[in-house]
Image: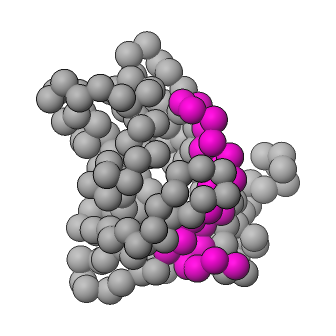
Amino acid sequence: MTATSTADREIVISRLIDAPRELVFEAFSDVRHLSRWWGPDGFTTTTRAFEFRVGGDWDFVMHGPDGTDYQEWITWTTIKPPERIAMLHGERRDDPNAFHSVISFRAEGDATWVEMRAVFPTKEMRDHVVEKYHAIEAGNQTLANLAAYVTEMVSKGVEG
């Protein structure tokens, strides 16, 4: 997949986080951390199953602030600590509308540049999640929640 072949099907969200790359990666790869920050503002997460390994799954429910539950399923396709995590993300295993996502972690001194790149099967699906679920705003809120969480970990002296 080249950038030109997928640009109209992508959502790319990034943020500089004031924490070491290993700690930011750990916050993405350990369910005890993920459940504390994953999702946009006002959302909580209940994990049903979690196995962080290539081919492993994360089966979870995101609970919206309005009481709506969103069934979610991720299978990890690539794990390269502390540089990259790739996954297939849908509502359930074998979801025909699942999308591919890659999260990259780049050290910037003592901080980490995080980029989340989601590639949808079609431009229409990408546009649908942007319109209906406010995916870009939600992604930015999710990374802000991550930044706040790892900043708190750093201030408490928690190491990755």
Q: What residue sits 74% from the left and 54% below the top? A: 7
From this view, report whether residue 73 is shown above or below residue 139.
below
Q: Residue at x 57, y 32 (%)?
A: 81
Q: Is 57 one of the magenta-colored residues?
A: no
Left or right for 22, reference 96: left
* Stretch in magenta: 72-94
Q: Is residue 84 magenta?
A: yes
| Lateral position of residue 100 relative to residue 92, left or right | right
Q: Is residue 118 visible?
A: no
Given residues 86 and 109, the one toward you in this image is: 86
Q: Residue furthest top?
A: 109
- Residue situated in front as seen by the camera: 82 or 146: 82
Q: Position of residue 36 (x, y in %)?
A: 27, 55
Depth check: 128 or 74 in front? 74
**Residue 41 x %, y %:** 27, 62
**Dominant SS in magenta:** strand
Occupied quadrant, residue 94: bottom right
Is residue 134 depicted above or below 107 in this figure? below
Q: Is residue 91 above or below residue 102?
A: below
Q: Residue at x 38, y 42 (%)?
A: 27
Measuring from the top left, give residue 48's x and y in whole percent: 41, 73
Asked whether residue 133 is in view, the answer is yes
